[in-house]
Image (cartoon, rainbow, N blue to C red):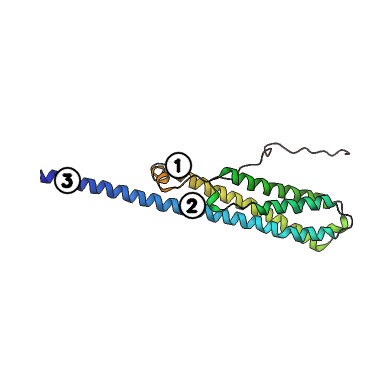
Amino acid sequence: MRSKGAITLAVLVVVLGFVGCGATSSYNSLVQGDEQVREAWSNLQAAYQRRADLIPNLVETVQGAADFEQETLTSVTEARAKATSIQVSADDLENPQQLRQFQEAQSALGKSLGRLLAVSENYPELRATQNFSDLQAQLEGTENRITVARRDYNNSVRQYNTQVRSFPTVIFAGLMGFESKTPFEAETGADQAPDVNFGDE
């Protein structure tokens, strides 16, 4: 009887050891994935902040152009204010609604910047200034950085979410409070080609 009890105890200890090692390994890999998502989010926020920091200089430079459309400048300034007012921390990445609001504000800012740059084509003296050309080049570079940072963020989220939903990690993830993160999604209407009209307005 004693040997049967000892064998049962030994088997139980071994099984518990495997479960403990599995839980530890799952926990550590989830922490690592979570930290990668947080780092990617921080990099994305830094790219958006860089764009927001360039806008006041761009607006000031453009205001120097005689009779530049004030409505366009106001639109950019208001979009920047809204985009910088919506803060999403790494702890909020499980909330799709909050991330969507952030994304929509950033998208609106990007569109208003696009309008500003398009309208500036009507001002050859503005486009000829070195300061405007430098700011325009910096904004283009920043938009590229934002694209890369969004892709990197989504890649980190995909890897993390795959891990959270994979067996056996899925068992431990829920118990340890690890939830799926929200990726950036394409904007509404992004699948539609824009209308191009070369005729007279």
Name the residue located 76 percent from the left edge and 54 percent from the top edge.
77
Residue 159 locus on image (x, y percent): 49, 47
Q: Residues within 10 Å of mark 3 (few under 14, many from 20)?
A: few
Name the residue located 79 percent from the left edge and 63 percent from the top edge.
131
Q: Between residue 10 and residue 92, name the one nearer to us.
A: 92
Q: Which residue is mark 3?
A: 7
State the SS at label 3.
helix
Badge 3 or badge 1: first in the primary sequence: 3
135 to the left or right of 124: left
Splitting the image into 4 quarters, where does residue 126 fall?
A: bottom right
38 to the left or right of 168: right
Splitting the image into 4 quarters, where does residue 48 fall?
A: bottom right
State the SS at label 1.
helix
Residue 154 locus on image (x, y percent): 56, 47
Name the residue located 78 percent from the left edge and 50 percent from the top edge.
75
Q: Which residue is mark 2?
A: 34
The residue type indicated by label 1 comes to Arg
Compute the Cα span from label 3 to label 1.
35 Å
**Residue 165: mark in rendering:** 1
The residue type indicated by label 2 comes to Asp
Answer whether labels 3 and 1 touch (C-beta < 8 Å).
Answer: no
